[in-house]
Image: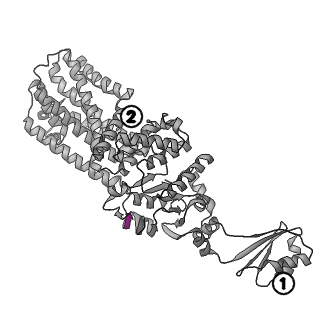
Amino acid sequence: MGMVSVKNLKKDYGNFTAVDDISFEINKGEIFGFLGPNGAGKTSTINMIIGLSRPTAGEIAVDGIDVKSQTKKAQAIMGIVPDESNLYNEMDGFENLCFSASLYGMRKEEREPRARQLLKQFRLNDAGKRPFKAYSKGMRRKLTIAAALIHSPRVLFLDEPTTGIDVESSRQIREMIVELKKQGTTIFLTTHYIEEAERICDRIAFIAKGQIVASGTLPQLMESVTHDYAIRFVTDKNSESFSIELQSRFKTSEVTAQSDNSLIMSSEQRIPLFPVMEFFHKKEIEVYEARELRPSLEDVFVKLTGIESSALKKDKEKGGFR
Amino acid sequence: MKSWIAFWNILKKDVKNYYLKPPNISWGIIFPLSWTLMQLIRSPGGNISELLPGLISMSVLFGTTSMLAVTITFERSGRSFERLLLAPIGLSVMVLAKITGTIIFGIFNAFVPVVFASFFIDLSAVKWGLLLPAVLMIAITSSLTGLLIAVSAKQVFEAQTFSNFFRFPMLFLCGLFIPISNLPVFLRPVSYCLPLTYGADILRGTISGANTLSPILSFGVLSVFAAGLFLICRYNINRKWIL
């Protein structure tokens, strides 16, 4: 059994089904990415796993603990970072961390050194004595993550950890997530930044309309949508002038001329480069670049969900997603 | 032990973040003082001993219900309340920690009119051994009423509106201003359904010996109210906040 195990999970709000019979497992020490647009069911799913919402049907276990019947026991090993930084505005950074630790039963002599350690680790030393309300968005996010780590959880749930914060803070958070994985922490991450998921996640699941459309490692997801090979050639001549001849010479490939002196050759089989280069040489066409085209995770997402990737960002910017 | 650490720190945070803030301290002093002065001006020759139970009850009721309803609704709207719901502590521990701060605040409010009255009348005949538990029980039941309101309210202004909806009818029906025997017959059963009726009756007995019910009965009913409200609040939190 995985560190997080979700089986046939369903959540209905009246007649509306927010999460529709989803199942997945997260292995120990893995970063699992959950990608989907606004209203896809990401937060509903995370809320059920962390015990903030009751499933209509299905089973959830975290490190073998049944979340439905032993919610508090399961919560003791979880670290939770909601999509909004929800620490106490009136308290300073150090107080917020110590208070979070006290909720997990940590004594003063344990929580204070741990809070100082986390402030240092998150480069918030100087801000430790400033009230939370005076923090920038990036600092608020980092302190919220630090608060989730105060009791050294075995599983960390991160809901949109880098949304709306500066580039430097985002980079620090991503580095920290990777570092936590190295230390053996299991991480469940929801994000609308496809590149972020592509960069740091070991496995990814796409969720749309409450259902998991696809899940797997990055190569598995790529494999699921395309078996084609494609090469883009950049030449010194207008590609439209010789593309028809090239097509007739290489019948198993599809040649598409581009407007910028380039063309794309695609085929179900690998394309041998030497005959193509020989063709260009005979025609006295200079080739400046020949590059294999691979689909991005964004292409895979769009193809599998039918949702334009830009919609993810736009939805979030509207602030409609909780 | 772990629950105790969480309980103590939630209580400490609430006292520091909410109850010890200047606006709330001034509310805790000015509100009971204003009520006391208003009553004295209204009936200059009036017997302060007769006014005191009402003033104590009002101070506790207004201090506790509004504070708990507003602070919880405020924490819920900022989502910091989720931290408590997600902590590995029992719901009962969390509820107790939240109401304990309000109870302390309510007791503090109760003693403002008592201190004020001590300048005008001799309080040596007051049965403190009964008055203190009575104030505590009024504070507990009022705090739980505040919590019940907080569970139903989504916004701070809603919490304030609901608080008034409960408080004012309770004040006029609990026998403080109008004796229950003088109320219309159809309203009398309502009076006996209000916890403040029993609290105010004990206070009247301890200060001026004018109680109409047995203190044992009143304490018993207040304990039933406290237990019932606690269970309802716990059930409602579980049902409404863990969706």
Q: Residue at x 34, y 51 (%)?
A: B88
Judge whether A86 appears above or below A246 on screen.
above
A176 horizontally vs A61: left or right:
right
Quadrant of the drawing holding the N terminus of chain A: bottom left
Q: CA distance from mark 2 to mark 1?
A: 79 Å
Q: Residue at x 72, y 70 (%)?
A: A293
Q: In this figure, which colouring scheme has been used for the structure?
A: one colour
Q: Residue at x 26, y 28 (%)?
A: B108
Tell whether position A189 is magenta.
Answer: no
For the residue pair B100 and B12, the one nearer the viewer reads as B12
Displayed quadrant of residue B103: top left
For the residue pair A76 and B220, the one nearer the viewer reads as A76
For the magenta stretch, what is the residue range? Answer: A58-63
B189 horizontally vs A89: left or right:
left
Q: Which amino acid is tagged 1? A: Arg
Residue A295 % position (x, y):
67, 69
Q: Which residue is mark 2?
A: B17
Chain bearing tag 2 is B
Tell whether position A59 is magenta.
Answer: yes
Residue A317 % position (x, y):
58, 51
For the residue pair A150 and B7, the one nearer the viewer reads as A150
Displayed quadrant of residue B40: top left
Q: Which residue is mark 1?
A: A249
B211 horizontally vs B136: left or right:
left
Judge whether A33 appears above or below B70 on screen.
below
B218 horizontally vs A12: left or right:
left
Mark 1 surroundings within 10 Å by alpha-carbon count, few (fewer than 14), some (14 through 19), many (20 or more): few
Q: Which amino acid is tagged 2? A: Asn
Secondary structure mainly formed by the magenta segment:
strand
Image label count? 2
